[in-house]
C-alpha cells in the first residue's frame, strides 16, 4: 500500500494500515469522565494530532512514545486544524520501518553547506580565536554530529541538517551586517555563531524522532558548550605553544551563555559585549523567519488567509502573497 504522508492528508480521508511515529502521548479524561489518548503523530513531512476515544490505561501504556504504530482511522478538521481519529492502533517494531519516512531533512546539500561554513571560518584571522575554532573542527565525531543535528525539536530548523543550515545562514548574515559596524570584532562574531548552538549536537537526539537527551534535559546546550570551550582552549594552547588569553576564552563563553538574551529564555547572562548582542539578534532573525515561512508553507487550511496562532511569534501569520494577489 502506498505511503500516506501527513502533508498530503485531507479532511474526510480514511486511512488504513499506515505507520506513524508517536512523537508524544498523554492520557486524558473527557468531561463525561471517560479516558482518551491525546497523541502527536509524525512523519518526515509534519505532525498531526491523534485522538483515541474510549481508551484505557493498558492501551495507553502499550503505545511506544518515540516509537512506531500501525493505525486505521479518519482525518477530520477541528477549529481549522487537522486531527486523526484513531479507530485501531497497534505498536510495530522499528526493524519493520523505513526510518527515511520519519525524519525530515534539510532541502539543501549538507556537504555544500559544511564546505561553505568551513570556508567562512577559514577567514578568521585572530590566531587565538582560530585555534579554538579549529580545535572543534578537528574533532571528527563532533563535526559529524554537527552536520546531522536538528536545531530544535519543533520550532525552527527542526530537521536533519537543521543546525548546520541555521549556523550557515547566521554566518552569511554576519558577513553582510557586521562590516557596517567596523568596531565590532568579526572574528568573535563568526566564532561565536559557530559555537552558539553546537551543544545541541548532544542536547538533541534524533535516531527515530527529535527529543531531548538526558544530558540535554539536565544540563542544556548552553552549559554544555561553555564547558567545551574551556576544554578546547587547552587544546588550542597546546597547538599554538602558548596560552589562549583569558579574555578571548571568556568572550566566547559569554557569547554562548548570553545568546538567548534573557533568563526566561534560558540564558544565565544578558549580552554584555556588542558581539554577543549582534549574535543574539542574528540568531533571532534567522530562527523566526525560518519559523514563519515554514508555518505558512505547512498550513493545512487553504480556506483561511491566516495560519493558526503561533505562540513563539505571539501572532497568527497572514498567508496571502500580496504581490501575486495584485496581479
Image (spheres, grey):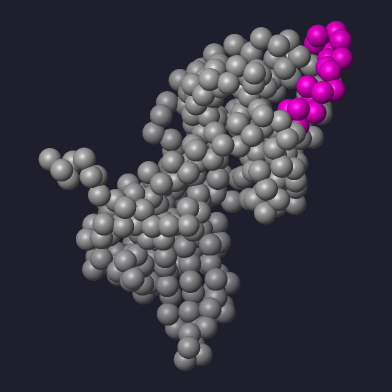
Please report the residue visible at 50 percent of the width from the left and 54 percent of the height from the top: 312
Q: Is residue 244 visible?
A: yes
User: Which one is nearer the viewer's eye here, 147 or 263?
Assistant: 263
- Left/right placement of residue 217 relative to residue 99 reads right
Between 160 and 251, which is closer to the camera in this rendering? 251
Q: What residue is drawn where x is 48% and y is 88%? A: 31
Residue at 25 percent of width and 65 percent of height: 11
State whether residue 111 appears in this view: no
The quarter of the image holding the N terminus is: bottom left
Question: Looking at the image, which is closer to me, 262 or 105?
Answer: 262
Query: How far across and how far down the image is residue 106, in percent?
Result: 43, 35
Name the residue furthest bottom: 32
Q: Position of residue 184 (x, y in %)?
A: 64, 21
Residue 140 in the image: above or below residue 18 = above
Residue 126: horizontal and vertical position, in percent? Answer: 71, 11
Query: Within the magenta stretch, is there residue 241?
Result: yes
Front in this rendered view, residue 276 or 47: 276
Asked if residue 279 lies left or right of residue 41, the reply is right
Compared to residue 79, the image places residue 225 above or below, namely above
Q: Main secondary structure of the magenta part?
A: helix
Identify the image quadrant of the C terminus: top left
Residue 11 drawn above or below residue 31? above
Q: Is residue 318 toward the left or the right of residue 200 in the image?
A: left
Q: How many marks?
A: 0
Residue 189 occupies quadrant: top right
Residue 21 percent across, percent down from the top left? 46, 56
The vertical placement of 181 against 241, above or below, is below
Residue 132 in magenta stretch: no
272 horizontally vs 288: left or right? right
Please tell me which residue is depicted at 48% across the width and 71% down the height of the picture.
38
Magenta stretch bounds: 237-253
Amino acid at each position: 500500500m502506498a505511503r500516506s504522508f501527513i502533508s498530503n492528508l485531507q479532511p474526510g480521508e480514511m486511512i488504513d494500515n499506515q505507520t506513524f511515529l508517536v512523537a508524544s502521548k498523554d492520557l486524558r479524561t473527557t468531561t463525561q469522565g471517560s479516558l482518551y489518548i491525546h497523541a502527536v503523530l509524525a512523519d518526515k513531512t509534519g505532525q498531526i494530532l491523534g485522538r483515541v476515544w474510549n481508551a484505557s490505561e493498558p492501551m495507553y501504556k502499550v503505545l511506544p512514545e518515540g516509537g512506531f504504530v500501525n493505525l486505521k482511522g479518519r482525518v477530520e478538521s477541528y477549529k481549522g486544524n487537522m486531527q486523526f481519529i484513531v479507530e485501531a492502533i497497534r505498536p510495530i517494531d522499528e526493524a519493520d520501518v523505513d526510518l527515511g519516512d520519519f525524519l525530515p531533512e534539510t532541502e539543501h546539500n549538507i556537504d555544500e553547506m559544511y564546505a561553505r561554513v568551513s570556508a567562512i571560518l577559514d577567514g578568521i584571522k585572530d590566531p587565538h580565536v582560530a585555534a579554538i575554532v579549529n580545535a572543534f573542527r578537528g574533532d571528527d565525531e563532533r563535526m559529524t554530529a554537527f552536520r546531522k543535528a536538528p536545531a530544535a525539536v519543533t520550532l525552527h530548523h527542526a530537521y536533519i541538517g537543521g543546525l548546520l543550515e541555521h549556523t550557515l545562514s547566521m554566518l552569511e548574515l554576519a558577513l553582510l551586517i557586521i562590516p557596517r559596524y567596523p568596531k565590532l570584532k568579526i572574528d568573535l562574531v563568526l566564532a561565536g555563531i559557530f559555537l552558539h548552538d553546537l551543544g545541541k549536537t548532544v542536547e538533541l537526539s534524533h535516531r527515530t524522532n527529535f527529543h531531548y537527551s538526558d544530558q540535554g534535559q539536565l544540563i542544556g546546550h548552553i552549559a554544555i558548550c561553555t564547558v567545551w570551550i574551556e576544554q578546547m582552549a587547552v587544546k588550542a594552547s597546546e597547538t599554538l605553544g602558548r596560552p589562549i588569553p583569558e579574555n578571548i576564552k571568556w568572550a566566547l563563553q559569554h557569547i554562548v551563555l548570553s545568546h538567548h538574551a534573557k533568563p526566561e529564555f534560558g540564558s544565565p547572562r544578558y549580552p554584555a559585549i556588542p558581539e554577543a548582542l549582534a549574535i543574539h539578534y542574528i540568531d533571532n532573525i534567522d530562527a523566526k523567519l525560518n519559523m514563519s515561512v515554514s508555518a505558512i508553507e505547512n498550513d493545512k487550511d487553504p480556506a483561511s488567509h491566516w495560519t493558526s496562532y503561533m505562540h513563539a511569534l505571539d501572532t497568527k501569520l497572514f498567508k496571502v502573497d500580496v504581490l501575486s494577489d495584485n496581479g
